Amino acid sequence: MKTVFIVDDSDTNLAMAEEALEDHFNVMTLPSAERMFTLLGKMTPDIILLDIEMPEMNGFEALEKLKSDASRAQIPVIFLTGTINTSIQEKSEKLGAVGIISKPFTPSTLIERINSHI
């Protein structure tokens, strides 16, 4: 079963995503990018769903750090965000995200987008 990391500072979003995906994937929910990097030291997911707006290290900073590590640079990342505009889309593409999903999301959208990238 493929492994999905969901990184979001909202417990509600983590719970909703986990519920939507748990029958299809091995799901790891993480409340911060820092926790994601700790777990990346122990396991490698098939894809990461990463919130953009988080305290301490935002999604853009986390993606830059991830892509700077050759051993992790190929992990596909889909951003989760409540706000999608041209500058966010451009920055996401420039940094190497494979897509953006707006919140609130539907389970079918999450599953479809994940399956298209793993």
Image (cartoon, helix red, strand yellow):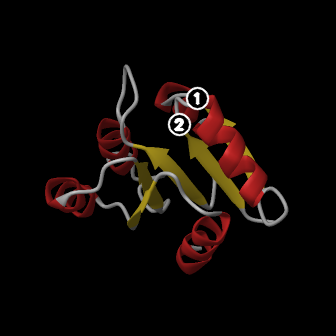
Residue 19 horizontal/vertical position (percent) = 77, 51
| Res 64 quadrant in image | top left
| Res 51 quadrant in image | top left
Q: Residue at x 30, y 42 (%)?
A: 60
Q: Nearer the viewer, residue 18 or 4?
A: 18
Q: Is residue 92 left or right of residue 51?
A: left
Residue 5 horizontal/vertical position (percent) = 62, 48
Residue 100 horizontal/vertical position (percent) = 39, 61
Looking at the image, the residue that sits furthest to the right is: 23
> Label 1, label 2: how many angstroms apart (C-alpha)?
5 Å
User: Of the residues under marks 1 and 2, which one precedes in the sequence?
Assistant: 2
Q: Is residue 102 left or right of residue 105?
A: left
Residue hosting label 1: 31
Q: Nearer the viewer, residue 28 or 54?
A: 54
Q: Amino acid at mark 2?
A: Asp
The crowd level at tag 2 (other Cα within 10 Å; few <14, some 14-19, many 20+) is many
Q: Residue at x 47, y 52 (%)?
A: 103
Seen in the picture, residue 44 relative to 12 is either above or below; the reply is below
Q: How many marks?
A: 2
Q: Is residue 32 visible?
A: yes
Q: Is residue 18 left or right of residue 105?
A: right
Callout 1–callout 2 Cβ contact below 8 Å: yes
| Res 52 quadrant in image | top left
Q: Amino acid at mark 1?
A: Pro
Residue 43 horizontal/vertical position (percent) = 68, 45
Residue hosting label 2: 8
Q: Nearer the viewer, residue 17 or 46?
A: 17
Looking at the image, the residue that sits furthest to the bottom is: 116
